[in-house]
Image: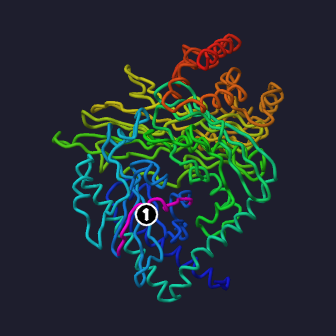
Amino acid sequence: MQFDPIVLEILNNKVAAAAEEMKSALQRTSRSMFVKEAADFGVGLVGIDGLIFGYPSSASTQFVIDSDSRATIDSVADLAPGDVIVTNDPYRSEGFATHLPDIQMLKPYFHRGRIVAWGWCFAHFTDIGGRVPSSISPTNSELFQEGLIIPPMKIVKRGVLNQDFVTVFTANSRIPDINMGDVHAMLGSLAIGGQRVADIIERHGVDSFVAAQGALLDYSADKARDVLRLIPDGAYEFWDYMDDDAVSPIPVRVRVCMVVDDGRVLLDVCDTDPQVGGAYNVPTFGRRNYWFTMRFTNFLLTHDPTIAQNAGMYRHISVINPPGTIMNAEFPDPVGIRQATARRINDAMLGALLKAVPDKMCAPSCGASAPFALAEYNDQGNARDVKVIEPLRGGMGATKGQDGVDVRDVTNTNMSNHPIESVETEAGVIIRHWDVRPDSAGPGTWRGGVGQRLTVEFLRDGGTILARGMDRLRFPAFGVYGARPAQPFRAIFNAGRADEVEVGKLDALAVNAGDTITFLTPGASGYGDPYLRDPEKVLTDVELGFVSRAGARRDYGVAIDDGAVDVQATRALRRARVKDNARADFDFGPEREAWEAVFDDETMSALNRRLAALPKSVRKDKRRWIFEHAVPDLPKPGGRTLAEVLADPDAVRVRLKAAMDTAFD
């Protein structure tokens, strides 16, 4: 069917408006703080091909538009009006669900006996059972530890809630009542979507409605390709690191080769590190999904905000994603913190894009989001509750010509902070300090966004805190085109007291009344040489608390005296700067430079190819054995620096070669 462009635009606005109404309904009726305040959920209209064709522009999770529900739909038979499918199984859904707390629902919308579309929503459930409160731990070693696994099945049958499902679901959570509140919010959202689909069909006819699904995807695909043509043809390689996998101190490398040809983009991650023992594996089934295209969602909608937001945006992006890497989890790999790995692969893609179109890209963001959860007993001490206290974000990267956004990194999701009033009402805590973190941003001609400092005091004994997704403790956001790296993530237990401890990557930590935890979230990278920043802008940063006076002098060569720039002293500081202070391209910082003095790209790519040829059952252990023999005293992030441990890179290379020869003999 050929569409008049005006009619197609009308239909696009109507399906987007229907999705907006679904989104508002779910958020307003939910029970959990993480859904109603932070907005960790998504909704949309899915076509008969299983791809999203209608999405709310106000959603906090724009990147999930590149979801594919076909495997889930195909696995449930005998669908009837009023049915609703539910799943959270990353493997049986073939990557439609990507970790167990994200529960997905699909409702078929019927018209005269045939399915004409689907309503879809997901919400992050704060606890669905498992080994730890909140279900997510970086040290989980298999999927079964991460909570209740729900294969694709019917939660509602012909309009009647499946009570057997409810019984099992509520028996496997520490917060069953709150969870069921969110379930009902999701079902209500899907019902509203069905009403709006019926309204559209009544006005435009069922044939036009069904045909519009493909036409809207085609329209977005064409416009997206025009944006992708802004990237010059060629091959662009880049890699970045996670600090470790939480079960060992070994850094984890993600690598991409981006090949561009006339608006078609191929992402090759073949030389990325193997699957790991912690919960950082990403379930993609070897296919493109939203964890690969997250960075391109930002790129496309930045350079053409008029693109209709649907799955067609990604049609001209493909991947080479073989088995055996951390970007292609295999059952029963744990996947709870897959977003930390996805952030890093997208930072690698950002590096490739910065090589290709430096004037059109921002510098790296903070690179870590760590929802901070508390499990505590009530005042009577006879029931345990689980709450997410704060999403914990850092800053956004600068662009050429503009400073980064402070504290509010939205490059992954646009989730909101929890208001202090809500936190202190719903949990046994007091927020003692919440402010920007001075000097955390990467210095540049255009400054990166700063992170935040949050101190929470606990009011009850017997609590447990978790902060899933902490990263960038060792390898901070890298500086871009003369900018310096940002400051890393830190977490401090009882800061300023005799029992103060730097806890590093937080897993599960016991807390009692009077204890505190202080999070210093990482800053983002700047853009350009910081010694070229306007001194008056540096003065403003000092006045606003983003940069200290010492930081102004050290990082920007700006002297401030009595609330004003000392022009003569500033000129002297900038003239005296060491000439090699600014890097021409990327400044990765001393930790990465020390690591790559031994574990360079050629060595790591060769090692990963040899590991990929091994059976999965031995791959992780073999990798760990090699690194432990090459660097037997490798510290965890926050301990000794890599520069200290790898002070004699020649000796480490000798040990590495001997270990590889033995391992692959």
Q: What residue appears at the point 46 percent right and 65 percent down from the top-left corner? A: 43
What colour scheme was applied to this rendering of the protein? rainbow
Position of 170 with respect to 434 (left or right) is left
- Above/below status of 289 relative to 585: below
- Return the x and y of residue 654 as percentages of the image width and height: 68, 12
Which is nearer the eye, 410 or 184? 184
Quadrant of the drawing holding the N terminus: bottom right
**In the picture, residue 522 is in which quadrant?**
top right
Which is nearer the eye, 189 or 333? 333
Residues shaded magenta = 66-80
Q: Callout 1, which amino acid?
A: Cys
Q: What residue appears at the point 41 percent right and 72 percent down from the top-left corner? A: 108
- Above/below status of 225 relative to 485: below
Q: Is residue 177 magenta?
A: no
What element does badge 1 sit on?
Answer: strand
Provide the residue designation for mark 1.
Answer: 121
